[in-house]
Image (cartoon, coloured by chain):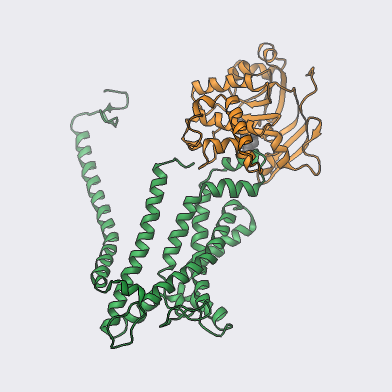
Amino acid sequence: MKTELGNLGNDGLLRPLKQGDNFSRLDFRRTVKNRVMLGLLGLASLVAILPLLFILYYVIHRGIAGLSIRFFTQLPKPVGETGGGLGNAVLGTLILVGLGSIIGVPVGVASGVYLAEYRRSKYANVLRSAVELLAGVPSIILGIFAYALIVVPMKGFSALAGSIALAVILIPTVAKTTEEVLKLVPDHIREAGLALGLPRWKVILRIVVYGSRSGILTGVMLGVARISGESAPLLFTALNSQYWPHGLLNPISSLPVQIYTYAISPFDEWTQLAWTGSMVLVLFVLVANLSMRALIYQKGSGGKTK
Amino acid sequence: MKLTLEPILSAKKVNAYFGAFQAIKDVSLDVAPHSVTALIGPSGCGKSTFLRTLNRLHEEIPGARFEGEVLLEGEDIYARGMDPVQVRRKIGMVFQKPNPFPSLSIFENVVVGLTLAGVRNRHLLEETAESALKNAALWDEVKDKLKAPGTSLSGGQQQRLCIARALAVKPPVILMDEPTSALDPISTARIEELLGEMKKEVTVIIVTHNMQQAARCSDHTAFFLLGELVEHARSPTLFSNPQDRRTEQYITGRFG
Ligand SMILES: Nc1ncnc2c1ncn2[C@@H]1O[C@H](COP(=O)(O)OP(=O)(O)O)[C@@H](O)[C@H]1O
Ligand SMILES: [Mg+2]
C-alpha cells in the first residue's frame, strides 16, 4: 500500500519509497549490518553462558560419583577410612542460612520499605548510601568484622556469629530489591489508598507491600541463595566442626567451608566429598533460582499485576 | 452565587501552594448537597489542585501548603485536631487513571476501605460490595467473577470498580478528577449516566476538561483560570449566558 511516507508492507512496517536501486542497496547494507551485530551479541551471550555450563558439567561430572544417601546422613570419616558423608555440613548450612534469614530478611525488607516509601527523607538518603556501601563490602571483611564484634567478646566461634555475618550480607541485597520492587508501584495507587481514608502505614503495608509480595519474595530468595554459598564470612565466625551441629554457641560445619577444607586436602576420599558437596550446593542454588523465576513467570502470565 | 439549600461543602478563601508557587488563589465555592458540580478550565489552571485541597490530599505532596477553610457539613476539615484520615473517609475520590489495587480481587478492591478499617463481618461486606457495585453500574458484569483480580477488568470497568470502591465507605461527598479522560467513548457515556444516579446518594464534584461533559452531567459549573475561580453558576446559565468575558471566550473555544 502506498502512503505519503513510504510503502506500507503486509507486515505493517513502513518502507521508504523505492527510487531506483539506491534504496535497495541501502537496505542490503543495513541487513548485513544487522546480521553482524546480531551475531556479535549472540557470541557475547555465549561467552557469558559458557562458564555456567562448564561449571555445571564439571561439578556434576566430578561430584556425582560420591552422591548417595550416606552423603546426607553421615559424618565425615577420619583419614584412611572409607565412606562417610557431609551430613553435618548440609545440616549446618541449613541452620546457618535459616537463622541468617530469620535475622536478615525482616531487617532487609523493612529497610527496603523505608527506602522506597520515605525516599525523600534525609534518613532515607543516609540509609540508602549505607546499604549501597554495605553491599559493596567484600564478604571476607564482613567476616573479620563479625569476628571482632561477636566472636572475640563471646570468646568462641559459633553458629550464631556465622548467622549474623550471613545476615549482614543478606540485608543490603534484600533491601535493594525490595526498594526497587516498591518503586515500581505508581504513586497514584498510594494516593488512592490515602483517599479511602486509610492511614499511610496501612496503605504501605496492606496495599503497596502486599501487592508487591511476589517481587519481594523473589529478592529474598535470590539473597538467600547467595548467602548459602558464602564461605569467607564463615571462616572467621562459624569456623568448622567434625560433629553434628550442637547448639548455636558452638562452631558449626557448613558446606562452603567444608568444601574449602576438603578440596585443598591431599586425600582422595575428601576431595571426592568436596566435589559432591559442590554439586549439592550448586544444584541447590540453581533450583532455588529457577523455581523463583518459574514462579515469577507464572505470575507474570497469569494475573496482570499493576 | 446563592444556593437555595445549605451547602454541604463550602470552600472559603482557599489558597494552595507548591513551594513558592501559588497554584490556587482565594477560591471560595459552595456546593449544594446531592448535586453534581463540574470544575472546568484549561489544563494547568489548578482544577486538580483545588480538588485535592477538598480531601486534604494536597498536603501529602512534599512542599505543598494550604491556607483557608473548607467546611464539610459546617465543620472545618482543616481545623486543629482534625485528622486527615477521618476527613478522607467522608470525602471519597476517583482518579484520572483507573487504579484498582494490584493483586486484590474485584470483591477485595470494593470493600478494601472497610476491611482495612477493621470490618470483619462477612455478611456486611458482601452486602456493601453488592450495593456499591450496583450503584457503580458494574454488578451485572462482575457478579460471577468477584474473585478475579481487579486489574483483569477493562479500563472502563476498572474505573467503575474504583467508583464502587469509593462508594463502599459511604462518603457524603465524592471528588472525581477527570474520571473519563483515559476511557473510550462508550465507557465514558456509562460513567456520565452513572453521575445522575449517584447524586441520589452522594454529592459529586467532578473535574473535566470536556465542556460537553460538564454541560451534560452537572448541575453547577465552576470555571477556573490561572488558579482563580472566574465564574460559578448553574450549568445551563454558565454555558448559555456567561457573565465573565473570559468564561465566554473559553466556552466558545477561543482559548484553552
Ligand atoms: N506536584 C506539583 N509540584 C509543583 N507544581 C505542581 C504540582 N502539581 C501541579 N503543579 C502546578 O500547579 C498548577 C495547577 O496544576 P493542576 O492543579 O494539576 O492543574 P489542572 O488539573 O487544572 O490541569 C500547574 O501550574 C502545575 O504545574
Ligand atoms: Mg488535572
Q: Measuring 37% from the left and 63% from the top, which residue is drawn there? A: A285
Using the image as rendered, state which of residue B41 and residue A223 is in the foreground: A223
Q: Is residue A237 left or right of residue A286?
A: right
Asked whether residue A31 is in view, the answer is yes
Chain B tint as drawn: orange
Q: Measuring 60% from the left and 39% from the top, which residue is drawn there? A: B112
Residue B12 drawn at (x, y percent):
79, 31
Using the image as rendered, state which of residue B64 and residue A262 is in the foreground: A262
Q: Is residue A187 left or right of residue B79?
A: left
Dividing the picture into quadrants, the one containing residue B39 is top right
Residue B249 drawn at (x, y percent):
64, 17
Residue A210 sits above or below residue A157 on the image: above
What chain is the green one?
A: A
Asked whether residue A256 is in view, the answer is no
Residue A219 sits above or below residue B218 on the image: below
Looking at the image, the residue that sits furthest to the left is A21
Residue A214 drawn at (x, y percent):
47, 50
Quarter of the picture containing the N terminus of chain B is: top right
